[in-house]
Amino acid sequence: MSLSLVRNAAIAATIAAAVSAQGVNCRLLSTVNPLTGATASRNNYAGMWGVVVNGRELAILPARSGTFVYDCTDPANPVLLGSVPGSAPATGYYWREATSLGTYVYTSSEHQNVQAIDVSVTPPVLANTFGGRGHSIAMDAGTRRLWVNGGALNGARIYDVAASVTNPPLLTSYTGAYVHECFPDNGYCYLGQISAGNFRILDTSAFPTLTILSTVATPGGDTHNCWTNKDATLLVTTDENLGGCLTFYDITLKTAPIQLSTWCSPAGATVHDAFIKGKVVLFSSYTAGFYAVDMSEPANPRLIASYDTNVRTGNGYTGCWGCYPFQPSGAVYLADMENGLFVVEPTCGVPVQYGTGTAGTGAKTPAVDYAGGFAQVGRATFQLECTDMAPSAPLVLFIGTASASVPVFGVNLNVDLTLPYLQVLASANAQGRFNVNVPIPMQGAAGATIYAQVVTLDAGGPQGLAASQGFRVTICP
């Protein structure tokens, strides 16, 4: 079926897949399958991505014959906005990945050059095709550089999207080893060098000079992808060998990463693409579907939630290929290789940041997250962690039972103070951090939701205040 012939009826929910799928602390919101009739277990879909355009949450579903774009602002009712055909042969090639910058989505394939797709219009349109073939693709949003990995070059080619969003010039290439996937961020690039069986950390701060800081063999010897936490002190890798696992590293010292722990699928499935969001790593895992794992104590990772998109079992390369967990709503997009797009939502344990924060000194916006293990009944070590505040700044941490959106004194209050709440008066430490223990009782807590926000005195903020977004998390059984 060509993309141009797809009708709305073709994206009806895949009933068989939904009935057979199972979730733990995770619910299915919707599923659509625009290319029905897969002739093999792994020939229709691959990567998964998401963007926000004019307040709308869009799902980007790369497929064998092109790229589908869905409006998932109502995650229970995805709306097909359009599709952009690829130039692959009639049989297609399902290894298609995506990334984005602003309102442009970039897709890579080992059968065609990079496509730049404008998703600010409906239907989305192909703006240009440029560069060469690539197995995967990644955007460094801070520098507006696009990394195209593997494919024609084997290493990586870096393009200057700052110069042109639709026809970026080639800046330089990395040829040190085959790059399967990479994560470029904040002056570094973390390479998954699957053929060499290791990850490599590059210093890109003196670009175009790429300086190798460290190269570390991963336990499975098939290093697929890498991702770091916000402050680049922790890194997770995936090994794409049969039954391969996650591995966590302390990368505070980039020249000497320290392995901390591994986590393997309880079903024996192979891990694939992993992403870190706050204190949680969320990832696709082929025949097991989707997992969310707590990494707040990285030496002791814990399973929070899972959702299986496919009836297949074992450790083979079928089932859930792609995962995108960064939409503001908290919805997670999954790409099942046979069954298309799944929109799921962890029902507990995985926090959501909501509302508006207010930046202070140095344009830093305070943040609230958790520590000490995810929110679960009986977790005596559970903490609320406030970061990114001015050093030694006085603060008030509001802990409530409902959200709000109330502008006051130049900030937005995101916790409802008309209902019962707690407030903690304290000061940040010299690093602009503050933690408070919030023990979760054994009885009566499951299903309750914690809302929190920190407000600080900060001369760099409007009216001398800075504030975080709201933080909410539901307590798991």
Image: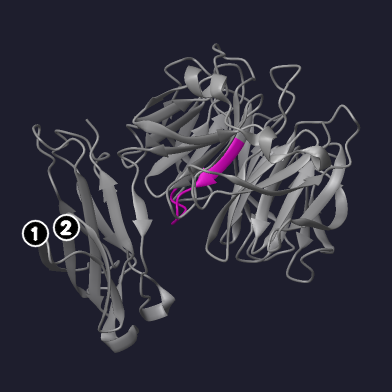
Q: Are marks 2 and 1 in contact (CB under 8 Å)?
A: yes
Q: Amino acid at mark 1?
A: Pro
Q: Position of residue 34 (x, y in %)?
A: 69, 34
Residue 141, relative to residue 457: is it above or below? above
Dot 2 falls on a residue whose secondary structure is strand
Instruction: Kindly identify which residue carries mark 1.
Output: 420
Q: Position of residue 445 (x, y in %)?
A: 14, 38
**Which residue is rendered at x = 84% and y = 64% of the image?**
169
| Label tally | 2
Residue 93, relative to residue 314: is it above or below? below
Residue 46 in view in this figure: no
Occupied quadrant, residue 409? bottom left
**Which residue is rendered at x = 49% and y = 52% of the image?**
327
Q: Amino acid at mark 2?
A: Gly
**Are there few (<14), some (14-19), or many (20+) residues within 10 Å of tag 2?**
many
Tell me the quarter of the image containing the N terminus.
top right
Residue 165 in view in this figure: yes
Q: Earlier in the sequence, mark 2 or mark 1?
A: 2
Q: Position of residue 231 (x, y in %)?
A: 44, 56
Residue ranking furthest to the right: 89
Q: Is residue 265 left or right of residue 142?
A: left
Q: Is residue 392 left or right of residue 367?
A: left
Which one is nearer the viewer's eye here, 21 or 475?
Answer: 21
Which one is nearer the viewer's eye here, 180 or 218?
Answer: 180
In the rendered structure, which segment of residues is drawn in magenta? 225-234
Disc 2 from disc 1: Cα separation: 7 Å
Q: Position of residue 420 (x, y in %)?
A: 8, 59
**Which residue is rendered at x = 17% and y = 41% of the image?**
381
Dot 1 falls on a residue whose secondary structure is loop
Instruction: Kindly identify which residue carries mark 2.
Output: 400
Look at the image and name its color scheme: one colour
